Amino acid sequence: MKKGRIFLYFFLVLVITLFNFYFRPVESNPKLTDDYRNSNSFVNNLYVSDEMFKKSLLKPEDYYFYESVLKGISEGKDSITIKCDESDNCSSLLQPTVEAIMLDHPELLNFQVMATGTQKDGYFIYNNISTLGPIQYKLGTLRIERIINNIRKDTKNMSDQEKIIYVYNYVASHDYDYAFTFTGSNQSAYSFFTKKSSVCAGFAKSSQLIFQNIGINSYLVTGYDHMWNYVEYEGKYYVFDATVGASHYDKSISRYYDGLGETTVGETIGNYSELYPKIETEKLRNIFEL
């Protein structure tokens, strides 16, 4: 009888944990519509993309390449075969395509910008580098949905200034992965939300997901082997960089920097600067009088 009660107790704890972490009903991203859900751009409920970089870095006739790679990654495929004649030179499309997908879709949990591919016999084979299996991908997405839903509740009645500071402090409470393994999970929001540690790509992509879900406009930015965000405040855009978030709490460490205005690389202008709104040089920390 005693063993039965113990088993029942642990069974109930397991059910409650699974429900709370993965299956508890939550509100969807406020930007998500049925039309978007049924479009080629839809990956999961975490993010709605305008695919600005697809439209800017690729020609319309090459969108099929982008859409094929995006669909394959979304389905968890490690190898994606795309029909492509030799005259199309799909090899030249690989780098701009993966760059565009990286910046357009921070909700992908099993993708990194490093990519390889081969073109042969009328086909191009793209190799996706990922360490997440389909179950990890599904459960990871469900878990992140529920974490972000909690953040939406926490910030519901906050001003934009309070929301930006909240996100910075929240991201800063996570650890930087100094072991640094360049894998799909490490380069995505997956490691940040499920392991509470990541590298710059994970910090920036997670910030991007949170900002959209709480009503703050922002962009992902790459440059100088780094990734960060531009965030809108009162109609203007500013640098937001929460990488090495733990340094926010300890100014004595050598890697400390002010993420509400500076980046680890000492530069605030990244790649494709012509595609972004004008970026203000004044620091958010000064504007917020922190």
Image (cartoon, rainbow, N blue to C red):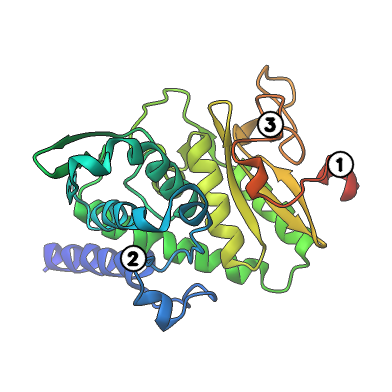
Work out whether 16 lies above or below 105.
below
Answer with left or right where residue 266 lies relative to residue 186. Answer: right
- At label 2, which amino acid type do we have? Tyr
| Mark 1 and mark 2: Cα distance apart in space | 41 Å
Q: In the image shown, does 256 or 233 lie closer to the viewer?
A: 233
Tell whether 150 sits left or right of 85: right
**Element type at marker 3?**
loop
User: Which class describes the residues within 10 Å of circle 3: few (<14), some (14-19), or many (20+)?
Assistant: many
Comparing 53 with 91, the one in front is: 91
Identify residue for label 2: 22
Q: Name the residue under label 1.
A: 282
Query: Which amino acid type is marked by label 3?
Result: Thr
Mark 2 closeness class: few <14, some 14–19, many ≥20 residues within 10 Å: some
Quadrant of the image containing the C terminus: top right
In the rendered view, tell whether residue 99 sits above or below residue 158. above
Q: Which amino acid does label 1 sit on?
A: Glu
Image location of residue 131, percent across then percent down: 25, 39
What residue is at 42 percent from the left and 41 percent from the top?
A: 96
Q: Where is residue 26 in the image (x, y as percent from the top left)?
A: 44, 76
At horizontal 55% and vertical 44% (from top left) the residue drawn is 204
- Residue 152's spot in the image, x, y percent? 59, 69
1 or 2: tag closer to the N-terminus: 2
Q: Name the residue under label 3.
A: 263
Labels 3 and 1: the sequence-earlier one: 3
